[in-house]
Image (cartoon, grey):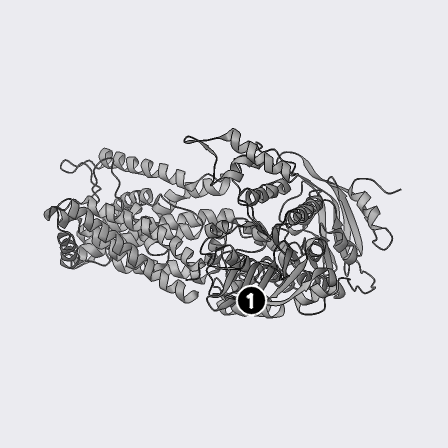
Amino acid sequence: MKTKYAVEMSNITKQFGTFKAIDNLNLKVEEGSVHALLGENGAGKSTLMNLLFGFYDLDGGNIKINGADVTISDPNVAHELGIGMVHQHFKLVKPFTVAENVTLGSEIKKGMFVDTEASEKSVQKIIDKYNFTLDASATVADLSVGQQQRVEILKMLYQEANILIFDEPTGALTPQETEELLKTILELKEMGKTIIIITHKLNEIKAVADECTIIRKGKSIDTVNVAETSSDVLAELMVGRKVSFSVDKSDKQAGDSILVVEDISVTDKRGVQTLKPTSFNVKAGEIFGIAGIDGNGQLEIVEAITGLSKVSSGKISYRLENDYMEITNMNARKIAEMRISHIPQDRHKHGVVLDFNIAQNASLKDYYKKGFANGILLDKLKMRKLGEKLMEEHDIRAPHGLNSQLRDMSGGNQQKLIIGRELEQNPHILVASQPTRGVDVGAIENIHQKLLKVREENNAVILYSLELDEIIDLSDRILVMHDGEAMGIVDPKEVTKNEIGLLMAGKRLK
Amino acid sequence: MNKSNNISKFVIPLISVLVAMLIGSLILMVSGISPTALFQAIFKSTFGDFNGWLKITSMLIFTGLAIGFSYKGGLFNIGAEGQFIMASLVTSIFVVNSNLPNAIVPIAGLAVGFIAGALWAFLPGLLKATYGISEVVVTIMLNWIGMYLYDFIVQGYFHQASNAQQTPIIEPSKLLLINGFSYAIIFALIAAFVYWFILDKTTFGFEVKAIGHSKDISAYTGISARARTIQTMMISGGFAGLAGATYGLSYGYMSTISGNFSNYGFDGIAVALLGGLNAAGTIVAALLMGALRNAEAAFGIARIPSEISDIIIGLIILFSIIGPILAKKRQKRGA
């Protein structure tokens, strides 16, 4: 029997200015299958789906849905063709109820009024059919991220979409929610839906996808059968080279303490002590990990050291040329000038100015410095050169080169720019706050190597991450936090992951 | 992309003006007035009263720069009007009573106007920087306070038998005039250059724009958002103050109807938006808007309701705001 394709995209091309976002790309998705789109940040996955969903017009190529040629000029056409999409950032009206959100645009009416009862009933019926534990009359603002995503899925099911697109659906989910979503995707497939999932997480692809198309720099590299392809091969196809998942860390003796933190505590605006008095020291030539479940005081420590926020008590001393000097509650610029660099957790908020271009963002730590600026004047040539250097050394890809606004770049490339800029400061201490959040496998490996290089050069790295594996693989010592309190400092070679997990949960080791 | 951006920089304002003129003409036609009378009036008063055109234009350049500078710093100084009024009053008093040589007086007057405008903008800047209170609300309030304070002082202390609403009259020799010809425009062009220079060339301007785009970058880079916010407001107020000073120094006095605004501060919003917030654009927009305002006297003679210029300016603002949004949408679709 001939295979039926729900979606056939052939020779697709899409250009933004001189930048070819999609270059003669082909994609065939079998009806009733789960098809993954795998690619690095900025490879063109989302652009491709936006073409399929009618957000952009095609520059070349053609699209067939269920075997028929179509022109998808806007999302309404996509809806009519039975295509639904769950966006990375949900498009929900928060103060509305689940039923109101789901029926929005095709409300059930009684005369000129919305029939609330009938619409809640009909939405609840779908909820029950798919076993989404949700209340159709609940307000969306009160729901968790995972539940909100289910509302997005409900919207597609209510529209009777048969081709469901998920754009990086697990980015904002907890591990439990992720597991549930993957289960839901498999159930939807059972019911005959065709599913396209965009992701750069290999384990998710292995868990749900039948086939996987790998996209690199706007081109389709290959389409593989997932069951017959190992994660290593998938990663290699995606990045274009071999990717090592294990970290090669040299054995090396750490030096003297470069940072001494004594009894620092942080009290927030509400008067809650979010960090209880905590002491530790960081040595030259080590990676000092800070582990914990999100929101247990790690961020407070990182922000206190880098000057982003103030401590209520305690003292932070930093060794500069054999003398210890106090840097407690100093201005972030002064701390940075003493070569304590910072990769901030929230890159859009703190790491970059989204409306500035690459050259401007590259110079954010230098633009004013003696030897960089001409007195009160900017040295634009130096700024551009620094931007070019970072782009080259850190493989930063951007649609319009040096003049690209950060807003137009993918998260991974923004992160590369921040890391490059911070390393350019030749830090004695590099404070890395969730440095691999939201970046793809290839970039993660690259970032890990850069952190290790700082350690190799006998400088210190303070690594705060929510990925326990990452901390265990990279760190020489790990500070484990629970409820704003230090549970202890452990050597990852001497304790198991399980034991660290217990500390994170607030159980002290015997 | 960059090329098309440059094109849209010129095309959008041009279309905005043309469409606004067209709609203005249609409104006139509906009211039974020939639109050609409108264009004749504008043409005649622009080239017949060149001096008057340039006087208004130079004030509009200043207020346009005032609004533009605040925008670049992430603020909206809708109080340019109040700063204009206060500066014009303070400058008049200073110049009338000044014993400085006549050659220096106008320049000293401009400096006084700058300072007066900057001081009137200090409070909203301080409240915004310290407590996050909206500068829009505070400056609107200060517009009314400024206007009535002006009324109060002018009526109370400079009450003149014939003209109740008039600032003290400056001697002609102290004005920005050579042989009756106003050279305020030269200072306006210098101000536009300074505006460009600060924002584009200096580290200070870089910081103003950085904070303008993202307040949160302040904690990370150590740029003081508080200081930059206050400074941005004061520089913006200073530009508006220069316009106020120019009024007195061009016409010799300012005379208004009690309880009315001069509107130069508000027109600055249109100039800034039409000019795309950049220095050169602001000059061009001020020339256009100046021609329209300068023609209002001729409108009366031609029996064209002078409100037509308000309508056209309002439409220009509207299209200047809508234009870039539509252009962006088109770009997104890959056109």
Residue A69, percent from left and from top: 49, 60
Please tell me which residue lies in front, B134 or B20. B20
Q: Residue at x 40, y 65 (%)?
A: B4
Tell me the residue at 61%/37% (across/down). Answer: A127
Check the image and name the residue furthest to the front: A1
Q: Secondary structure at mark 1?
A: strand
B259 or A434: nearer the viewer: A434
Percent across and percent down for residue A316 are: 71, 49
- Can the viewer see residue B188 in this picture? no
Quarter residue B262 falls in: top left
Classify mark 1: residues with Cα within 10 Å, few (<14), some (14-19) or many (20+). some
Does residue A273 appear to the left or right of A47 in the view shown?
Answer: right
Residue A269, relative to residue A229: is it above or below? above
Q: Position of residue B29 (x, y in %)?
A: 16, 48
The residue type indicated by label 1 comes to: Leu
Is residue B70 among the parts visible in the rendering?
A: yes
**Which corner quadrant holds the N terminus of chain B?**
bottom left
How many numbered marks appear? 1
Chain of the residue on which disc 1 is drawn? A
